[in-house]
């Protein structure tokens, strides 16, 4: 141990003990708390498991990365584990009935201890060496450890020379420790590899929801690391999270994570524990930028909501078509726990500009199982309710569910399901009456949404709008656009006066395959509240290989260059799909639309008949330089 140890050993030498002496205080019938994550006091746990005279001893903790010998079958008559969050080392014991699982929000576990509803007889914890004032840091895990240590009748601390000294509300004085056991044990490490392509696709969609100055909640795994990979160009991001891993370090070093715009604990990374590599443990050691607080503070939804632009990112096992999220069980098998998902989902939802996100791959088991499902598996638990869910993200995009009808939710989730499962999900949704019975059927091999066509476009008046392909879920947006059009705009587009645009008519406008049949839309922005202000559509005739094109721009957005920009994008899309050219019918007094076609860069052949120009635009002619909108 360091030289500082001599100071407190003189004063508290009667507390120094071996591991065997430290755990000798445990009696039959005691409830014993074990430190969390990579702060599990392995020396003490091993000594406890060796005490053959113990019986009926309860072991409680959230996930640990140690070996958990007390959960093994041979020790079942001496110990029974109670998991507040199930980890890989105790999952089999819970499934076999040798251990228990208590579902509870991570923010509320400390109250169990402090109120006495779950009396902690002995707390086995791991801490750093004491400083010159006799204070030990809880190190890599403050989470529920602080509440357990402060509530326990007896505290036994493994004083690990390799435990980092982390700052914040995360200290215990040696006078509050009953037994001090010295150790020099390497902390377990869980280094993260490079995100795979699937995680990167999910991460890119999540990153599109992030803004400069946002505060993030991140966990561990390939998806959080993939999100961080796409944030390198952002400014002044902050961190308020129950835990983080190595992925934040490069963004701190690049000056992306500064915490400078946080509205709670400005300038500080706020967390309650970490899991990662030794590099991470060294990063948090005595680092003034990092402060640890217990989960009753970090995970309190009211504190989370104090961070403006709070973005929470949490995982799920499966999501049903109504938006119910299962995150702790595989059917009847308990797999993990509630953890902090609901705490941060509700906190982010109440944050000014906040966005709660549920992220998951669209499939499992080698793409043989859809994770977007008609109904959760029998016995599966709902961790996050329909009313709490805002965003659900897969590798196929983001679905926004909050405030949406069951029909809109089902269609949005089907849109981000794996394409091969979408026809099945459509059929199931119809059977349950969740969507229209005449909803467009999807082909067995539905087209992939061409996200590469998404882009921001600058208009002539220096405003920016977001262009993207039309989605099957845009029915309400197209409907809203129609009812904001003037009579002239309706007449120019449909060649007749329509007074309504019911579901039956909207169906045909939404039927796109992104190849022969394409529609591009312009949105006021890229958020869930954006309005659809323009649409460009073409439909190919297989006999001629020419596509009939039509455009529609909301009246208050006309004259800004939207039509020209959509035209250029539609031409590029059609040519890339092998289409030979465009045809169009334009009324003679629709001067704006005629200008759009004539500015497309290709020669326009026209024929006037019955008050309308029939236009033909072959793409095999030499293209003229485009004229800017």
Image: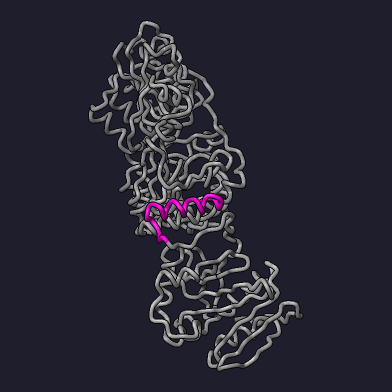
Q: Quadrant of residue 121?
A: top left
How many numbered dots are placed on residues in this image? 0
Majority secondary structure of the magenta segment?
A: helix
Q: Position of residue 497 (x, y in %)?
A: 43, 85
Q: Position of residue 216 (x, y in %)?
A: 45, 49
Q: Position of residue 309 (x, y in %)?
A: 41, 56
Magenta range: 417-437
| Residue at image location 50% in from the left, 34% down from the top | 275
Q: How is the image coloured?
A: one colour
Q: Residue furthest top?
A: 53
Q: Is residue 389 left or right of residue 257?
A: left
Q: Nearer the viewer, residue 139 or 71?
A: 71
Is any atom of residue 168 visible in this view? no
Q: Nearer the viewer, residue 25 or 227?
A: 227
User: Is 335 situated above or below 340?
Assistant: above
Q: Nearer the viewer, residue 439 or 383?
A: 439
Q: Position of residue 246 (x, y in %)?
A: 54, 40
Q: Is residue 502 left or right of residue 600?
A: left
| Residue at image location 32% in from the left, 43% down from the top | 300
Q: Is residue 600 left or right of residue 556?
A: right
Q: Quadrant of residue 354?
A: bottom left
User: Is 563 situated above or below 153?
Assistant: below
Q: Quadrant of the C terminus?
A: bottom right
Whether residue 444 is in magenta: the answer is no
| Residue at image location 53% in from the left, 93% down from the top | 589
């Amino acid at each position: 141990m360091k030289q500082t140890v001599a100071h407190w050993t003189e004063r508290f030498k009667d507390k120094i003990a071996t591991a065997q002496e430290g755990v000798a205080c445990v009696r039959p019938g005691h409830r014993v708390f074990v430190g969390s994550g990579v702060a599990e006091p392995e020396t003490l746990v091993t000594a406890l498991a060796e005490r053959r005279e113990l019986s009926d001893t309860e072991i409680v903790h959230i996930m640990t990365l140690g070996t958990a010998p007390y959960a093994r079958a041979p020790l079942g008559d001496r110990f029974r584990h109670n998991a507040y969050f199930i980890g890989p080392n105790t999952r089999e014991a819970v499934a076999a009935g040798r251990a228990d699982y208590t579902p509870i929000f991570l923010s509320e576990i400390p109250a169990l201890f402090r109120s006495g509803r779950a009396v902690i007889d002995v707390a086995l914890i791991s801490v750093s060496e004491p400083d010159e004032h006799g204070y030990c840091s809880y190190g890599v895990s403050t989470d529920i450890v602080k509440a357990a240590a402060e509530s326990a009748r007896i505290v036994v601390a493994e004083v690990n020379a390799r435990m980092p000294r982390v700052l914040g509300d995360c200290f215990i004085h040696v006078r509050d420790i009953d037994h001090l056991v010295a150790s020099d044990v390497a902390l377990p490490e869980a280094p993260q590899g490079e995100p795979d392509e699937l995680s990167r696709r999910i991460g890119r969609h999540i990153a599109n929801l992030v803004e400069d100055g946002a505060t993030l909640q991140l966990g561990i795994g390939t998806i959080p690391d993939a999100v961080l990979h796409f944030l390198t160009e952002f400014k002044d991001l902050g961190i308020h999270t129950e835990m983080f891993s190595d992925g934040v370090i490069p963004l701190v070093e690049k000056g992306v994570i500064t915490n400078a715009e946080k509205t709670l604990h400005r300038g500080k990374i706020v967390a309650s524990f970490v899991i990662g590599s030794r590099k991470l443990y060294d990063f948090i050691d005595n680092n003034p930028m990092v402060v640890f607080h217990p989960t009753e503070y970090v995970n309190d939804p009211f504190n989370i909501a104090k961070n403006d632009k709070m973005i929470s990112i949490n995982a799920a096992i499966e999501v049903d078509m109504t938006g119910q999220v299962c995150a702790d069980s595989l059917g009847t098998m308990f797999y993990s726990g509630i953890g902090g998902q609901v705490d941060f989902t509700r906190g982010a939802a109440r944050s000014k500009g906040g966005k709660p996100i549920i992220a998951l791959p669209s499939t499992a088991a080698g793409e043989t199982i859809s994770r977007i499902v008609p109904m959760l598996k029998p016995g599966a638990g709902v961790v996050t309710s329909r009313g709490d869910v805002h965003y659900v993200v897969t590798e196929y995009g983001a679905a926004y569910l909050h405030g949406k009808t069951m029909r809109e939710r089902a269609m949005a989730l089907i849109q981000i399901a794996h394409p091969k499962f979408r026809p099945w999900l459509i059929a199931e949704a119809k059977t349950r009456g969740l969507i229209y019975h005449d909803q467009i059927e999807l082909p067995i091999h539905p087209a992939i949404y061409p996200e590469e066509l998404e882009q921001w476009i600058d208009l002539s008046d220096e405003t920016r709008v977001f262009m993207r392909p039309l989605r099957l879920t845009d029915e309400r947006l197209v409907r809203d656009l129609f009812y904001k059009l003037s009579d002239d705009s309706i007449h120019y587009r449909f060649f007749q006066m329509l007074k309504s645009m019911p579901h039956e008519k909207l169906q045909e406008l939404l039927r796109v395959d992104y190849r022969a049949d394409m529609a591009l839309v312009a949105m006021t922005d890229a958020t869930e509240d954006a309005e659809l202000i323009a649409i460009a559509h073409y439909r190919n005739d297989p006999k001629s290989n020419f596509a009939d094109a039509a455009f529609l721009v909301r009246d208050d957005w006309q004259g800004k260059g939207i039509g020209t920009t959509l035209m250029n994008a539609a031409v590029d899309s059609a040519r890339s799909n092998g289409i030979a050219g465009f045809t169009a019918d334009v009324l003679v007094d629709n001067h704006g639309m005629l200008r759009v076609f004539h500015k497309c860069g290709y020669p326009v052949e026209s024929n006037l008949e019955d008050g309308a120009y029939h236009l033909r635009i072959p793409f095999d002619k030499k293209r003229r330089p485009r004229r800017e909108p």
